[in-house]
Amino acid sequence: MAEVLPLKALHYDLDAVGSLQDVVAPPYDVIDTATRAELLERSPYNAVAIDLPKPYGETGPQAEDGEDPYAQAARAIHAWKQAGALVADSEPSIWAMEQEYSGPDGSAHTRHGILARVRVEDFDTGQVLPHERTLPGPKQDRLELMRATRCNLSPIFSLSTLDPWPLVEREVGFDEPWGEATDASGTVTRIWRIDDPGIHDELTALLADAQLLIADGHHRYETAIAYRDEIGGEGDHNYTLMALTGLDDPGLSIFPTHRLLSGFAGDPERQQRLGEGLRELFEVTEVETDRVDPLGEDGVGVFGLYDSHHKRAFRLRLKDTAELDRLLEGMPEAYRRLDAAILETLVLKGIAGLSEDDILAKRGIGYAKSVEDSLRLIDDGTYDVAFVLRPIPVDQTKAICESDANMPPKSTYFYPKVLTGLVFNPLA
């Protein structure tokens, strides 16, 4: 059973910090140095100061020069509590969340969900399901931060097979939200605090029969498992902060992440091997550049291609699945028909000769969230070849999660991200 409960949140006092807008931040793994500095200019209490503490040797807002960055984050939380910027609720709440956004394709959506604490389960129980491979470095970083702060600072975004929104929607109504923030992409996030214990009990009962699919935050969830096992016994450390959206929510969208390759422009022989290999496995048809996106195309293994040599766009369509099925024998059909897995198996590892380590370490491979960025990075010489992918249907994502297979890295792009700083979940 999935155990979804209200939390006694640690959160900002908006009267003290000014507005939620000033103190929230994107998830740590999409923040570069310039963005971090910009967020801290908005407010010294911005969540980035604790969720992405400075490296050793730098001076943070509440830290001495040379301090351990994880200790620095813990010191900041303590100082913010003392200053009244952070307050701890004495009673548990569920937090309703709404996000209005325009997708990378320009389409408008409104996604709904809740913020709650969820019991940490091992993956083999089948209650919480992953869909992507993880790397050891980020997990160690998050574990050190969790040990120091004893908090979940950033919610894991998960999809629920049962939708919690209808139960909280009637409570939200037309009330003013507790807080509202607009991120750099224009996404408007609103949250409402739901204090009614009756609603809490209804949500817990409803979601007890749900499966939860991790959409964004695999490293954080595996860190939560490690921290739970490290502490041992019962307690708040057996739970983690999650943002839960129903799989049937009409505002849920899954966008593709496109693949970019380097190391071909200066190597004519390798470039020729790639071209010959693609023509052997795929039907290759030239298309107008504005039709390079295969969105809406039917069939197995359909991609857009654009490269720095031809500066022209092509449509790739897999000729047959025999070689693919041979190489992926034993994998579930939903995985064998996944565009990202087809590209990784036949092209990246096959024709281009990349190893598993190359892909995980991003050696010779990069990623782009939009078709426009993909083409720009080819035209400016950053990369040499772009493969444009289609979005993954929600049903296919669910089928792969329910199997023993994990998708290749960056197979899904769940947009928008859930902000850090809406609420924090104390673990002690």
Image (cartoon, grey):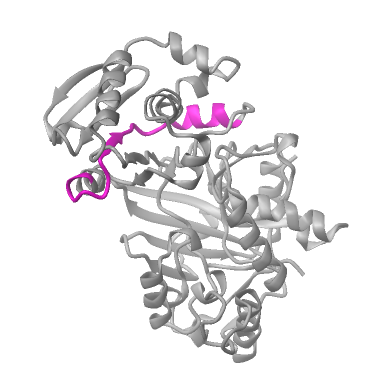
Q: Is residue 399 magenta?
A: yes
- The quadrant the N terminus occupies is top right
Decide if residue 425 is on the left or right side of residue 38.
Answer: right
Q: Nearer the viewer, residue 64 or 302?
A: 64
The magenta-colored residue range is 378-401
Q: How many marks?
A: 0
Which of the 4 quarters of the picture holds residue 263?
top left
Judge whether residue 427 can be spotted in this image. Answer: yes
Judge whether residue 119 can be spotted in this image. Answer: no
> Residue farthest to the right?
233
| Residue 135 rendering spot, x and y as whole percentages | 58, 48
Residue drawn 49% across the image and 36% down it: 248
Q: Is residue 160 magenta?
A: no
Residue drawn 54% across the image and 58% down it: 96
Q: Nearer the viewer, residue 426 or 273?
A: 273
Decide if residue 326 is on the left or right side of residue 75.
Answer: left
- The quadrant the C terminus occupies is bottom right
Vertical arrangement, residue 106 with respect to residue 236, above or below = above
Which of the 4 quarters of the picture holds residue 275?
top left
| Residue 421 rendering spot, x and y as whole percentages | 52, 69
Vertical arrangement, residue 198 with respect to residue 35, above or below = above
| Residue 206 rendering spot, x and y as whole percentages | 67, 42
Decide if residue 366 is on the left or right side of residue 307.
Answer: right
Vertical arrangement, residue 164 with respect to residue 150, above or below = above
Which of the 4 quarters of the picture holds residue 310?
top left
Residue drawn 26% across the image and 44% down it: 374
Q: Nearer the viewer, residue 188 or 82?
A: 82
Residue drawn 56% across the image and 88% down it: 65
| Residue 265 rendering spot, x and y as whole percentages | 23, 39
